[in-house]
Image (cartoon, rainbow, N blue to C red):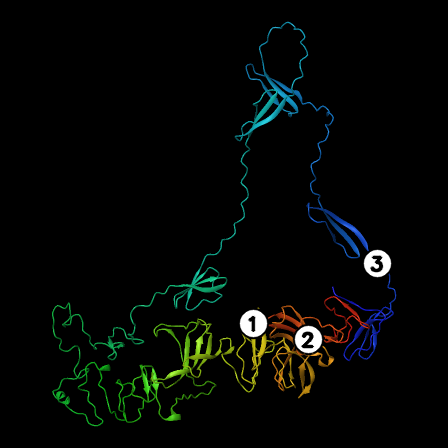
Amino acid sequence: MAQILLKEGVVPPTPPLGYATVYIKGDGLPYTKDDQGVETPFVGPKGDTGPAGTAATVDVGSTTTGAPGTPATVVNSGTTVDAILEFTIPQGAKGDTGNTGSTGAKGDQGTAATATVGTTTTGGAGSSAVVVNSGSISAAIFDFTIPRGDVGSTGAKGDKGDTGNTGSAATATAGTTTTGAPGSSAAVVNSGSTSAAVFDFTVPRGDTGSTGAAGTNGTNGAPGSVWYEGSGAPSGATGINGDYYLNVANGDVYLKAAGSWSVVGNIKGPAGSGSGDVSGPAGATGNNIAVFDGATGKLIKDGGTLGTAAFTASTAYDVAGAAAAVTPTTLGLVIGTNVQAYDADLTTWAGVTPGTGVATALGNTAGAANGVATYNQLGTAAFTAASTYVPYSGATGAIDLNNQSVFNVSHLAVGTTTVPTILSRFIGDNGSSSRSSIRGYSNDANSSSWRLTKFRGVAATPLVPQSGDSLGKYEFAGYTTTTSDGVPSATWEAVTTELWSATARGTKVQLKVTANTTTTQAVAMTVDQDKSATFAGTVSAPSIAITGTAGAGFQTFVGQSSNPAAPAAGTLLVHSKTLNGFTRLEQDNEAATNVIYARDNVFIASNPTGTTIPKGSTVYVSGTVSGAPQVQLARANSSSTLPCVGVALDAIAGGAFGQIMYNGLLTFDTSAFSATDKVWVSTTAAGGLQNTRPSGTTNFVQRMGTILVSGNSSTGLMFVHTAPAVLNMETGTNAATWTGSTVVALTGISGGTF
């Protein structure tokens, strides 16, 4: 640990302006002297004796034996005033085996086993003798059953025999135990001898007990899967995990898992191989005949009936399966009512050439559309809406449709005689009048609109749009030599953001443009379904006001992984960047100098000299100009070039303004140092840094931060933290003695810490 040794009894002179001196006077107390010569003691006079404290108590709590080899512990379960000490003392390890002891004295005689006679029962003559031990093996009680014998004659008294040897103690042990049938008798059989009895037991089984109480019901099994169906995607409230859902609109099969539906398959078969380009009308009348509409062979229409009096099965006509082929004469028609009688004059009309405004119905090509001749040069009394006729050309005046509808138009061309390949084409050659207008009249707030609609499927069976479908677009195109409708170079398009249903119709809008010298459109702006707007490029405006609902925030910056390109001269680019999992707000100027808000502290200053201040140079304030400080290169060998106020964020040309960082992270060439080096203002190189603390009584000490990464101008990194400048104090007369490799902070000194 570093320490400061102050020589007692030496009063130093008054320090320079802006500094303070620490010393110890003859009374043994530390003092400070400021730049006005005012002395201030560090320690005040001794205070009054305080009241007596409460006596502390110490008590022993529990004592626990710990495992062998564990450390002993003492825990205070009480307070610092009333301590209760809980001891844990480990058990000692097992000791070595002791020496063999001497032979002990002969022990007392053990208690001998006893055997006494219990009951004696006389058995029947000829039966077997039985002995049962009703006692224990050490205190046997033998119950005898002895069969009755025949009465013999009295024998002569024998001589007294010799005293017999002491007999062995009898023993009795239990042998086998057998479970007998319920209701049978218990039995004990000696399978040993009379002196070493072994008793085998047969114990009858008890009667079967009553039925026990019923057990509790088992846990219900997991619910089985359920199938749902509907048109469109399922809602989140439908079903539970494990259920399935069929979207009948497109055949998608969904599975619900973890509370969400997801598509797991599709049961809709592949599309048929036919082109499917033949279409019919929206409706028809039963039993009517279908006929081709036009000559394309792709359109079918309702052809009506065969006549008011159709043929019957009894009518004689030429048909397969009829009894005979007979030519009909009237076909069920009445001359003068629904058919014109033949007249020879009709043959002469075929050679008549129509005059102006006159047309003929004869000589038409068979199979003409609608079965009606083409009429040209109609007069002002045109066909009414109820008439059936073929479109025509060559009109010399306006056609009045009498406010009727025009429908079933395949292609529409305005201003051109060329049939368009698209639905409609409008061509105008009258300049500013080449435009279309929709006028609407209303007594409410509604207005006219031009609606672009997207249906999936076909006209007969339309389907809802899916996510990513284009609902429609306005394309702005110009002339090229490859297409009669021009090539679009800007587009305003609506795109769905989810599968549509009765309750979900998410949509976003995109604006696409084509950059100069390119031919491909790119998204310039997106207004998403959540009303957020994303711009692909720079947004320029005299002023931009960003507002929002109170408490809901004002603007969201999406973090990027790298810095954007430098903005134009005279502009500042504010953006956000994500690094190490944290997103912060940054700014870049036209020189691509990057400053991070809430981390980097900078100010603008002027370089009054004629030479450039390099990036990373230490500077001091030498004056002011236009309300901004002027800075020059700092050096720690003189108070005239201190205190240092920061490090140049960029190179500052002579006579120009630049930015000075006094706190933050600065990237510049730190290859002269090592990572974790502490750096101070250099005493030898103006504007430089050094990684050794300045020494010498005339030098100053000002710490400027720490090197984080030793590297070149692109990779080197320094944590800039500008500390106050302090006059160095070295060993010598009228000065303190410093020991150790670092300087500790002293509180109470004007100007902060060392």
Residue shown at the point (57%, 71%) measured from the top left: 579
Residue 637: horizontal and vertical position, in percent? Answer: 72, 77
**Residue 233 lies in quadrant:** bottom left
Spatial separation of the CA atoms under disc 3 and disc 2: 58 Å
Q: Is residue 118 left or right of residue 397?
A: right
Closer to us: 245 or 173: 173
Q: Is residue 16 left or right of residue 289?
A: right
Location of residue 249 by image quarter: bottom left
What is the x, y in percent for residue 663?
Answer: 66, 75
The answer to whether residue 556 of the structure is visible from this angle is no
Question: Is disc 3 placed on a helix, strand or loop?
Answer: loop
Report helix, strand or loop for mark 1.
strand
- 10 Å neighbourhood of mark 3: few (<14), some, or many (≥20)? few
**Residue type, mark 2 in image:** Ser
- Which residue is denoted by mark 3 in the rendering? 54
Question: Which residue is at the far top?
Answer: 156
Residue at image coords 69%, 36%: 97
Q: Is residue 229 left or right of residue 290?
A: right
Amino acid type of the residue tagged 3 in the rendering: Thr
Mark 1 vs mark 3: give the one in front: 1
Residue at the (41%, 76%) spot, across then down:
470
* Number of marks: 3
Dot label at residue 682:
2
The structure residue drawn at horizontal position 43% and vertical position 85%, both measured from the top left corner, is: 448
Query: Marks 1 and 3, how far apart in space?
Result: 59 Å
Residue to which mark 1 is pinned: 578
Quadrant of the frame with the N terminus = bottom right
Position of residue 135 in the picture relative to residue 21 (left or right): left
* Distance (Cα) linking label 1 and label 2: 35 Å
The C terminus, quarter of image: bottom right
Q: Which amino acid type is shown beneath numbered disc 1?
A: Thr
- Of tags 3 and 2, which is closer to the observer? 2
